[in-house]
Amino acid sequence: MTNPIPLLRWIIRIGGIVALGMGLAFWGGSGYALLSAHQGLGYLVSIALLLMTILGFSRGVAPGLLVLAIVWSIVVPAIGAMQLRLLPGDLHWIIQVCHLLLGVGAIAFSEIIAGRALKGLPRPA
């Protein structure tokens, strides 16, 4: 059976980087026509992270890390969906920075989990 973790890892890498780029464009005041695509990529990254954490349980990854990653994969899209309603006005940048850090954190969690889940497994020739 093929190991799905590398595929999930690449989905998160590519989807996460593209979503981050779009988010930075929004922050700069342009590209709002791509908001639905940004949200879709955020959901894709969160679902892929959730699937990776589930696979991590069967591969001996630390359960505490996996539970935190599950919570993280739920919080990222929740904050994103509520973002425009949180701290409107001059302090909205705080929410934007939090959402940015949560997105980067989701990518980091995937890298940590994938690295630990794949550790010690033979690599294909």
Image (cartoon, grey):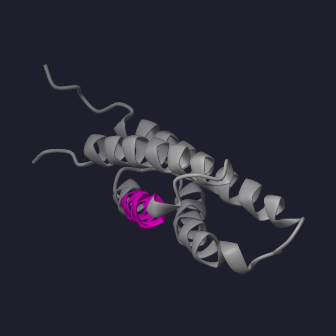
Magenta residues, start to end:
34-50
Q: Quadrant of residue 95?
A: bottom right
Quadrant containing the C terminus is top left
Name the side, left or right, on which 58 lies relative to 89: left
Which residue lies at the image location 16% right of the left edge and 25% below the top edge? Answer: 124
Q: Which residue is outermost to the right?
A: 90
Residue 34: image quadrant is bottom left
Total number of numbered discs in the rendering: 0
Which sits in the foreground, 119 or 52?
A: 52
Main SS category, magenta section:
helix
Q: Is residue 42 magenta?
A: yes
Q: Could you tell me residue 18's position as x and y percent?
A: 44, 44
Q: Does residue 104 show up? A: no
Residue 41 coordinates in the image, percent (x, y) = 41, 58
Task: Identify the residue shown where x is 52% and y is 65%.
Answer: 73
x, y (%) of residue 65?
58, 55
Q: Quadrant location of residue 50?
A: bottom left
The x and y percentages for residue 93 are: 81, 58
Q: Is residue 4 toward the left or the right of residue 79 in the image?
A: left
